[in-house]
Image: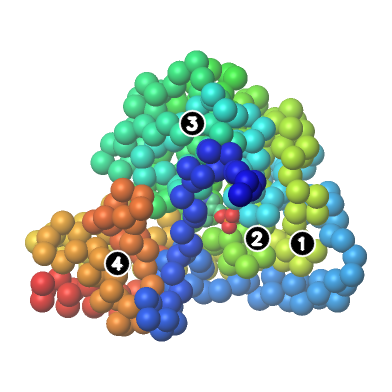
Amino acid sequence: MTKPVPKDWILGISPYVPGKSAADDGRPLIKLSANENPLGTSPAARAAVMAASADLATYPDPGANLLREAIGQAHGLDPARIIYGTGSDELLHIAASAYAGPGDEILYVRYGFSVYDIAARRVGATPVIAPDADYATDVDALLACVTDRTKVVFLANPNNPTGTMTPRADIARLHAGLRPDILFVLDQAYAEYLDANEDDGGLDLARTASNVLVTRTFSKIFGLAAERIGWGYASADVIDALHRIRAPFNVTTMGQAAAVAAIGDTDWTDLSRAHNARWRDWLAGEIAALSNHGLRAVPSKANFLLVLFDGKLTAEAAMKGLWDEGFATRWLPGQGLPNGLRITIGTKEQTRAVAAKLRAMAEAA
Ligand SMILES: *Cc1c(COP(=O)(O)O)cnc(C)c1O
């Protein structure tokens, strides 16, 4: 029997693995596996969703005008050069589609965000993976991997799943070393967790450079992952290309309203940033105290820690032990990190419970 045959590059894709919310036996778990905001959503954003739900019969504003204005004001950007997506995931995919195809190469670092591999293969492009430097970005290694076929470079900063930060000077050097016809996609999904003096300069670059696309999301610090909203900033030409292939009405009415309210609620983001920094650094200290048991946390600027297990306690055993305490974390064998567990920073109580369980398991192993 003949049947439709997907393109061979589609069959080469390993589907995205979402963070677990249950143990293998179905027990529901607290998710410390998807880098969501443990404090939830800003009350103002929740109220905006409720108000916007009054009208479900009409399509959303196709131009997301209020949202683009709010983002433009918050960051000093030209609203005409802001694009919005069904999560920033949509923007990563359409950036790959607009600028690469079969025969082209899409470049990113080892232990980069897993969506980059899918975005590259989906359009028939060849993923090229540059070596890391102790889990962080190695700008020289990335530049050494550029070929005549390179069309897009993806870099998350801070990076997921490592949490590592590529400093502003390195971002500038990477950009300066890329041919101007290569689109540099700087994925700032965790940028709102940084202190102001840690900014990597991506939006400044995107203001003037013709080949830089910065992407942001409302899924992380803003606590709106359920609404699926992201945005991007680039030159007018890049934005024009992306608009041609984004889905029409790609951000819902409730999502647009929620995002506008969330941008305005800086008390909520300040609280979330301070909570995260405090408990991330506390948990990193607890892990450091277990170094004699082979545990090590990669230095993180995001809302999670990548913990490496190189002693008797394995990452897989630690993940399963944490299930017993009611927590889902992210074990990463599929991303080349069989010894790595990515743990989202939870509430104070959750973070303390995770640390206590890790200590108990490490000492008993
Ligand atoms: C979470 C995440 C995103 C975005 O997700 P959306 O929910 O699609 O906006 C993008 N990049 C990285 C590196 C992430 O971790």
Q: Residue at x 26, y 41 (%)?
A: 134
Which x, y percent locates residue 54? Answer: 86, 76
Please state which of the two labelled residues, at mark 3 or mark 2, is closer to the viewer.
Answer: 3
Mark 2 or 1 closer to N-term?
A: 2
Judging from the image, what secondary structure is the residue with disc 4 in? Answer: helix
Judging from the image, what secondary structure is the residue with disc 3 in? Answer: strand
Q: CA distance from mark 4 to mark 3?
A: 38 Å
Q: Circle 1: is it few (<14), some (14-19), or many (20+) Cα within 10 Å? A: many
Up-down relation of residue 228 to residue 358 (above or below): above
Which x, y percent locates residue 268? Answer: 59, 68
Report the disc number at residue 228: 2
CB at mark 2 closer than 8 A to ligand 1? Answer: yes
Judging from the image, what secondary structure is the residue with disc 2 in? Answer: loop
Which x, y percent locates residue 161? Answer: 39, 52
For residue 356, side relative to residue 111 (left or right): left
User: Contact (CB < 8 A) between labels 4 and 3?
Assistant: no
In this rendering, does residue 350 appear at all? no
Q: Circle 4: is it few (<14), some (14-19), or many (20+) Cα within 10 Å? A: many
Mark 4 or 2 closer to N-term?
A: 2
Q: CA distance from mark 3 to mark 1?
A: 33 Å
Residue located beneath label 1 in the image: 252
Q: Amino acid at mark 1?
A: Thr
